[in-house]
Image: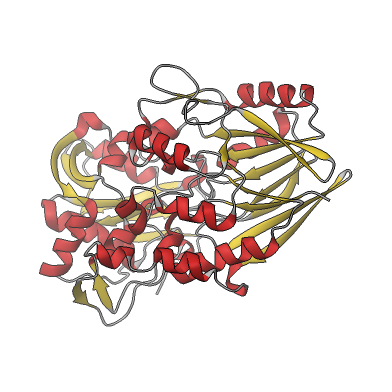
Amino acid sequence: MPRLLHYSDLENVYDDPERAGRLAGCVTALDDDDTLVVGTGDNSAPGVLSLVERGGQVLDFYRAVDADLETFGNHEFDYGPDRLRELVAASLPTWVSCNIRDEDGERFAADEGTVPWATRDVDGVTLGFFGVTDPATGSINPEAVDVTFDDPYVEATAAATALRDDGADYVIALSHLGSGDDELARRCDVDLILGGHVHAERDDVVEGVPIVRPGANGHVVWEVRIDDDRVETVRHKTAEYRPDESFVRALNGRVDAAGLDEVLCRIDRPMDRSEETVAAGECRIGNAIADAYRWATGADVGLQNSGGIRSGPPIGPDVTHADLVSLVPFEEQLVVAEVTGTELLAVFNAARGATMGFGEPDWWHAQISGARIVWDDEQNEVIEATVDGEAIDPDAYYTLATSDYILHTTQEFPAVTQSHRAGEYGIQHEVLAEYAREVGFDAAVEGRIERRSARPAED
């Protein structure tokens, strides 16, 4: 019986060598001759070690788990197309991708071994695989602007037809489409979708097609068993497995060697940065980051997108430079945008995630400083908003400190764009480090965001 072991969105798992080792140990313990090990993107970045190694730490993981197939997520492009081509060329797994084109309009990284689809014979069954990536990647990752993304559903249809013609008994999508997996199931001739991009786990069926998603940061591996016309799924918690000690040794010490272990300040009570806390509304860690942005720039309002705060262990009581890199592990500039009151209100009205393809509909996407907003969940809009205690004047101008990513992307706060740029103030995590040294790095939940008809925010 063919089996698949599915991981995705590993992101910063490598920053915790013990957890990364248990992930690798889980995969190797479950692997056998009738099993393929497959990933669905965002497995090389972001993270502290990823930033240090420019994604190269994933090569150790691929070797540790004897990975078979992989596809591209948006974060694979964090260090640019050329670096990604280097990683593909050095990788153990075969990369499958049918909807990405390079700067010349050719299949991305074809010379390095990427193929649009591939078949594997396992226990007498021919399995066909293709890969698809969110076409909004160029919008959500500035390093991918020179790469183009074809319609994933058109390309998936062509790939599935080619695989059937090539004798595939089962056609399996390795997908980094997030919420687009539902449309993939409805429109394309596939038997199974292994998904990523959205960090919430998933195990269900759409239009008769099983969809499996393991969530983020290496906590879960899905085992998928293909038995005649049935697909069975088994969830494995990686924390329950013995770590791969050789992989742990390969990771240990690399962050310390980068000189990021300096303690910048101490706080009395550690700050939670779990996805459940950050995506629920106002939280301490979000307030601290937004406060740092406003401190560094003198802007009227600080804004941090919740999705840009990476989950991990609580921050504190010792706060190191590595901790702050791990919060926002991107080489992004902190910028100031000049916006009208009308545009600022539009930013606040985009704070809920219902229209985004890489989050859950109820996720909250804005952490703020210098402002207060009241959001009504039933009306799905801001019903009160102030800056420095005063109601926002639609015709006045305000300065907004945020990451350069927010000005680049059209996926989160589209009212603010590159045309609003009014200044740059350094790399995000370096600004946070300076703030921690000079001011400290702590904050309380103080009513900056009030969500009516919603669960209470973190205490």
Whether residue 414 is visible, yes or no, is no
Q: Position of residue 437 (x, y in %)?
A: 13, 69
Task: Name the residue at 35% across, 33% down.
Answer: 82
Answer above or below: position of 326 versus 313.
above
- Quadrant hosting residue 295: bottom left
- Quadrant hosting residue 87: top left
Residue 442 horizontal side relative to residue 192, left or right:
left
Q: Position of residue 222 (x, y in %)?
A: 67, 57
Whether residue 277 is visible, yes or no, is yes
Q: State the quadrant of the C terminus.
A: bottom left
Answer above or below: position of 61 versus 417.
below
| Residue at the outermost right position | 228
Count of numbered tags: 0
Task: Name the residue at 35% across, 25% down.
Answer: 146
Task: Name the residue at 18% across, 35% down.
Answer: 421
Rendered image coloring scheme: secondary structure
| Residue at the outermost bottom position | 268
User: Viewer-proximal residue, 322 or 182?
Assistant: 322
Q: Position of residue 458 (x, y in %)?
A: 42, 70
Residue 143 horizontal side relative to residue 151, left or right:
left
Task: Name the residue at 75% across, 29% down.
Answer: 189
Residue 334 horizontal side relative to residue 236, left or right:
left
Answer above or below: position of 273 versus 369.
below
User: Viewer-proximal residue, 41 or 70?
Assistant: 70
